[in-house]
Amino acid sequence: MGTHLSVETNNNSVYSEETMVPGPLLFNRIKDMIKGIAGTRGGLFGIVFIAGMILTAIFAPFISPFDPNEQDIINRFSGPTMDHFMGTDYLGRDILSRIIYGCRIATLVSFGSVTLSAFVGVIMGVLAGYREGSKFDYFIILVFDVVISFPQVILALAIIAVLGPSLFNLIVALAVTSFPFYGRIARAQTLSVKESDFVKAAEALGLKKRRIIFKHIIPNIMTPVIVCLGMDMATMIIYEAGLSFLGLGVKPPTASWGIMLQNGYKYIMTSPWMIFWPAFAIAATMVAFALFSDGFRRTLDPKEREK
């Protein structure tokens, strides 16, 4: 991604230990990557939606027309009006405001759990792959297999039941249940990259293993990991909604799409908008992340770019 290690094999062979890409070059690569994703089918929608989701989460207090927990009992179960564009719930709370603040929870859970699980999984996978065949490698594979042997939702339920329902515990539980996925990808990629010429050159120069791993191997295996991150973020939002629906996610009255679904399904026949809008927000977010990931994959794949 943002790093490289060059080995030239001509008469003036030079081995470069410099791995940081100059700022302007890195900026140009990111700009070209965004243009490439936006040029794919649905990629532009994915980028715009995710960017809007992040901005909404950051500026929720300024965007939200009402306090998400402000009750107006007189106007409860109100349908969409000019004052309440998406209507109100059973306590008279503005649904639009709760959708906006729920975006914060969705963003924190998706980015937080995926980042934590990817960080742990990649580190463990790279260390295992670099020491292929050692006892450490077998131990890491055993850990991956043990965690994967449990259904992800059931394991997350068990962890939250022990730690207690909260936003932080929810992020930890989802990260613990998904890190082996990234670990397996990182290990498989490391087995290939460690045989590359630039890694062999670094080893021949006597560079420390830690430097080789963190400066030269990890930057060169992150492409498939990053592609999977986008897809996994959508999955984490679904898990957050499901666990919150069961009462094991964030605690009420915090605005969460899952809690809104829990509150809305009881009144689905009389106030369908209470469950429609959070369900629509979840579905649109999943589609956006899926399109973004597909666009990212197509941008990085030379065969796809030629089509």
Image: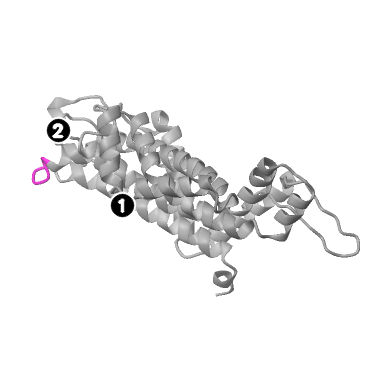
**Would residue 57 be visible to someone looking at this image?**
yes
Q: Secondary structure at mark 1?
A: helix
Q: Quadrant of residue 72?
A: top left
Considering every residue shown, the one lying at the far left of the view is 269
- Which callout, 1 or 2, points at the residue further toward the start of the chain? 2
At horizontal 82% and vertical 53% (from top left) the residue drawn is 15
At horizontal 30% and vertical 44% (from top left) the residue drawn is 239
Q: Quadrant of residue 95?
A: top left
Residue at numbered disc 1 = 283
Residue at numbered disc 2 = 90
At horizontal 39% and vertical 40% (from top left) the residue drawn is 176
Which percent across, then down, holds residue 118? 48, 44
Q: Residues within 10 Å of mark 2 (few under 14, many from 20)?
A: some
Using residue 201 as the reference point, say whether residue 166 is left or right of it.
left
User: What's the distance in space between the residues labelled 1 and 2, CA to CA?
Assistant: 23 Å
Give the magenta range: 266-270
Which percent across, then down, holds residue 69? 26, 26
Dominant secondary structure of the residues highlighted in magenta in the image: loop
- Check disc 2 and give the amino acid type: Tyr
Q: Secondary structure at mark 2?
A: loop
Considering every residue shown, the one lying at the far bottom of the view is 307
Which percent across, then down, holds residue 240? 31, 40
Q: Quadrant of the C terminus?
A: bottom right
Which percent across, then down, holds residue 103? 36, 38
- Check disc 1 and give the amino acid type: Ala
